[in-house]
C-alpha cells in the first residue's frame, strides 16, 4: 500500500526502505520521540519528506492531491479534536468533508456501540472525558470507511481492558472489510494484533 525509499525528514526520520502491505495490520512501536507520529503524518501527506520518495499504490505521494488522498487514507491523531456541536454532528463531519452519504441515526448509534461509547446522539462531547473523546473520534473515522486507517496511539486515553477490546474489534473490522490498518502504539499488548511489526529507533527502522 505504501513504499518508502530513502526517506529523510529533518534529523527526525531516516528510512532506507519500508513497505506497508495492503489489507494487513501494521503496528509501529518505538520509544517516545523516535518519529512514529512523524511517519504517520507523512503517510497522510500532512508533511512531506525532505528527500526520498513515498509511493501510495505505486504512485509517488507528491503526485496525489492531498484531499483526494485523505478520502482514502484517514488519520486518527493521538489527541483527537472534538468539534462544536453534538455527538451526531461530530460523527458525520468527516462524511460531509468527503461528500459521502449521511447514515441513519440507527447506524450512528451502532457505531457508538461498536466503540463502546454509551452516549446519545444529542449529547455534547465537550463534556466528555479524554477516553470518550478518543472513542468518538475513532467512531468518526470508522464511519468514513477509508481504505487505510492510520491510528496514532488509539488507546492512550483508555484503560487497558477497554483499549484492548476496542483494538480487537477494529482489527476484526479491518480484516473483514479488507482495510489496511496502521497502528502507532506504546502499548506492548497491541503487538499481538500485528501482521507486520515495525520498530523505530532514532528515526530508523530496526
Ligand atoms: N515539525 C517538527 N520540527 C522539528 N521537530 C519536530 C517536528 N515534529 C516533531 N519533531 C520532533 O521530532 C521527534 C519525533 O517526534 P514524533 O512525534 O514523531 O515522535 P513519536 O515517536 O510519535 O513520539 P511519542 O511516542 O512521544 O508520540 C521529537 O523529538 C519531536 O520533538
Image (spheres, rainbow, N blue to C red):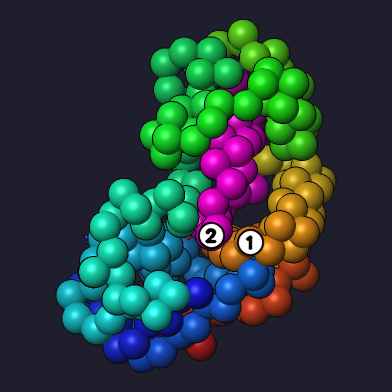
Contact between marks 2 and 1 (CB within 8 A): the answer is yes
Q: CA distance from mark 2 to mark 1?
A: 6 Å
Seen at 71% across and 32% down, the residue is 111
Query: Is 191 or 17 nearer to us in this picture?
Result: 17
Residue 123, percent across and down?
Answer: 61, 10
Q: Is residue 81 visible?
A: no
Mark 1 residue element: loop
Q: Is residue 10 above or below residue 183?
A: below
Q: Around disc 1, counting alpha carbons within 10 Å, would you say few (fewer than 14), some (14 to 19), or many (20 or more)? A: many
Seen at 43% across and 49% down, the residue is 71
Residue 110 is drawn in which quadrant?
A: top right
Residue 150, percent across and down?
Answer: 52, 57
Seen at 44% across and 75% down, the residue is 57
> In the rendered view, does 91 fall on the left or right side of 188?
left
Residue on which disc 2 sits = 148
Magenta segment includes 154: yes
> In the rendered view, does 146 fall on the left or right side of 121?
left
Q: Is residue 82 above or below residue 31?
A: above
Residue 84 is drawn in which quadrant?
A: top left
Q: Which residues are magenta?
A: 127-155
Mark 2 residue element: strand
Magenta segment includes 161: no
Residue on which disc 1 sits = 179
Give the mark, 2 or 1, whose residue is nearer the N terminus: 2
Amino acid at each position: 500500500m505504501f513504499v518508502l525509499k530513502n526517506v529523510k525528514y529533518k534529523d527526525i526520520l531516516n528510512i532506507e526502505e519500508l513497505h506497508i502491505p495492503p489489507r494487513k495490520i501494521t503496528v509501529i512501536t518505538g520509544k517516545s520521540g523516535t518519529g512514529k507520529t512523524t511517519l504517520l503524518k507523512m503517510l497522510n501527506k500532512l508533511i512531506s519528506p525532505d528527500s526520498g520518495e513515498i509511493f501510495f499504490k505505486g504512485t509517488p505521494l507528491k503526485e496525489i492531491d492531498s484531499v483526494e488522498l485523505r478520502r482514502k487514507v484517514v488519520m486518527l491523531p493521538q489527541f483527537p479534536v472534538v468539534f462544536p456541536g453534538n455527538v451526531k454532528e461530530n460523527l458525520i463531519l468527516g462524511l460531509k468533508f468527503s461528500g459521502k452519504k449521511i447514515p441513519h441515526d440507527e447506524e450512528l448509534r451502532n457505531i457508538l456501540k461498536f466503540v463502546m461509547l454509551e452516549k446519545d446522539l444529542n449529547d455534547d462531547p465537550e463534556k466528555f472525558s479524554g477516553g470518550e473523546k478518543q472513542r468518538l473520534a475513532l467512531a468518526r473515522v470508522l464511519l468514513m470507511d477509508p481504505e487505510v486507517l492510520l491510528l496514532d496511539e488509539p488507546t492512550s486515553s483508555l484503560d487497558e481492558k477497554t483499549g484492548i477490546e476496542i483494538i480487537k474489534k477494529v482489527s476484526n473490522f479491518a480484516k473483514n472489510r479488507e482495510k489496511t490498518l496502521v497502528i502507532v502504539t506504546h502499548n506492548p499488548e497491541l503487538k499481538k494484533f500485528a501482521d507486520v511489526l515495525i520498530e523505530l529507533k532514532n528515526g530508523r527502522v530496526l
